[in-house]
Amino acid sequence: MKTTKENLETIVKEMMSSLSSFEHDLHFSRVVVDTIIDMCTTRSYEAVSNYEWLINDVILGLAKNLKAELKSIFDSRLASVILEVCTRLEDVRKEALTPRFVTLLKDIEAVELLGRDGSFECLKAIMFVVGEFAHQDINESLPFEFADLLWTILKDKEDEKLHI
């Protein structure tokens, strides 16, 4: 079956739901996640018609819900999609930077979960996008307390990586 704009969301939703059934099989899960990302990003996102869905449901959904072993494998790739969609595709940036996206970032538990469970590159990508574009595209400024919290999480993660 060829992936098209008409069937991509249905196929990806089914594949993402299958991940929970096979979470004990790391190899199968890895193939499924790899396939999901490939289907969504092939030929410059040719089959994607809803970028809000891609960022919020697929990419951030994977970043938040994958087991730690898979997060470490796919973290950089998921972060790349966030950055590419939100920086290179200016015409769809507003779709990706919806209030829902910013609301997720203001959810302290979600931010801590991303940072704590190995989605470090995703967290940095999200911080960059919100810091760089939120004020331009959705006229919402993030409070300084939120920026301070993110900085603390990132600094703690860097310290852990450096074993300081």
Image (spheres, grey):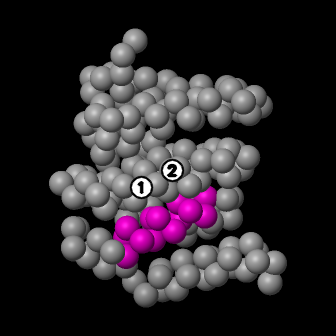
Residue type, label 2: Leu
The residue that appears at 56% across and 35% down in the rendered structure is: 34
Q: x and y percent of residue 159 in the render? A: 73, 80
The percent position of residue 132, horizontal first and vertical second, equals: 33, 75
Q: Is residue 120 magenta?
A: yes
**Which residues lie in the magenta part?**
119-131
Q: Which residue is mark 2?
A: 78
Q: Nearer the viewer, residue 34 or 65?
A: 34
Q: What type of secondary structure mainly makes up the magenta span?
A: helix
Residue 151 coordinates in the image, percent (x, y):
55, 82
Image: 79 above or below 149: above
State the residue position of label 1. Answer: 82
Nearer to the camera, 149 or 35:
35
Q: Residues within 10 Å of mark 2 (few under 14, many from 20)?
A: many
Establish if 141 lies above or below 35: below
Tell me which residue sits at (46%, 54%) in the image. Answer: 80
Q: Are marks 2 and 1 in contact (CB under 8 Å)?
A: yes
The three-letter amino acid code for the residue at tag 1 is Ile
Q: Is residue 106 visible?
A: no
Residue 6 visible in this rendered orientation of the protein? yes
Against 9, residue 87 (above or below) is below
Looking at the rendered image, the quarter that the C terminus falls into is: bottom right
What SS does tag 1 mark?
helix
**Extreme-right residue of the structure:** 163
- The span from disc 2 to disc 1 (Cα, nearest Å) is 6 Å
> In the rendered structure, does residue 55 fall within the stretch colored magenta?
no
Question: Which image quarter: residue 17?
Answer: top right
Residue at 23%, 68% (x, y): give it.
138
Helix, strand or loop at mark 2 = helix
Tell me if 108 is positioned left or right of 47 in this view: right
Q: Nearer the viewer, residue 86 or 141?
A: 86
